[in-house]
Amino acid sequence: MHNAAFAALGLNWRYLAFEVVPENLRAAIEGAKAMGFAGFNLTVPHKLLALDLVDALDESAKVWGAVNTIRFDEKGATGFNTDADGLANSLREDLKLELRGKKVLLLGAGGAGRTAALKLASEKVAELFLVNRTPSKAEEIANEIKKRFPSAKVSVGFPEADVDLLLNATSLGLKTDDALPLDKKKFSLKQTRSVYDMIYRPAETKLLAAAKAAGCQTANGLGMLLHQGAKAFEIWTGKTAPLDVMRRALEQNIYGH
């Protein structure tokens, strides 16, 4: 999507992928800076490590406690987080969902789950239910939310009543033989209006197929990928991201159409 956007705006830039092991992240950041990179994105497991390796943190990285975008300038390396806004923008666009006042069940308490939980709390959802395979990790996030957003109503475990949104932030669904990320004995998909799966490949996970069959509105994580990327593009280039061009490139690359 970035290379398509650079081409559309006539920028002589290139977006490339590099595999870096965690112990080499500091050297990779220094090397990219020395080679005159404009910046780069980070994916798991680097997003938390990078917090201590950049020269400055943008407010977004401080608030969400993770770095997925780095920009180099005269001040050095600045860390940003575009994931949280990417998620909120995608929920608004793909599910027509305004988060304020909504009840949300969030599955997963890893890096993506934590950022999502904090973002949902900041958007003033009415109630947030956190579920994770290891409940203590969900408890940690619940406690962090209570400290940072004291008015937020957050609990650990499946809700008994209906919710407006079920959000999957686990990796269950990436493989075709994965189990569903929720316990159907404790929560039925009939209890939610909308289901959002952060996974975008495959386009329809088992969870989304089951949600459609239950009559839910559904969306996958392609919109989140698009919006976090568009924000990163603007941070690096200072230009407005050509969203339609980027969306088409993503769909072509991921789904072949």
Image: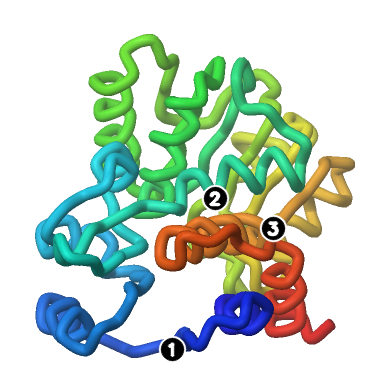
Give me the residue at 71% from left, 37% from top: 188
Left/right placement of residue 143 relative to residue 228 reads: left
Give me the residue at 23% from left, 59% from top: 78
Q: Nearer the viewer, mark 3 or mark 2?
A: 2
- Crowding around mark 2 (Cα neighbors within 10 Å: few <14, some 14 to 19, many 20+) is many
Above-or-below relation of 46 to 79: below
Question: The C terminus lies in which quarter of the figure?
Answer: bottom right
- The amino acid type, in three-letter code, at marker 1 is Leu
Which mark sits nearer the N-terminus, 2 or 1?
Answer: 1
* Label at residue 220: 3
Left/right placement of residue 31 relative to residue 9 reads: left
- In front of the other: 93 or 156: 93
Which mark sits nearer the N-terminus, 3 or 2?
Answer: 2
In the picture of the structure, the residue carrying the numbered disc 1 is 16
- In front of the other: 22 or 32: 32
- The amino acid type, in three-letter code, at marker 2 is Gly
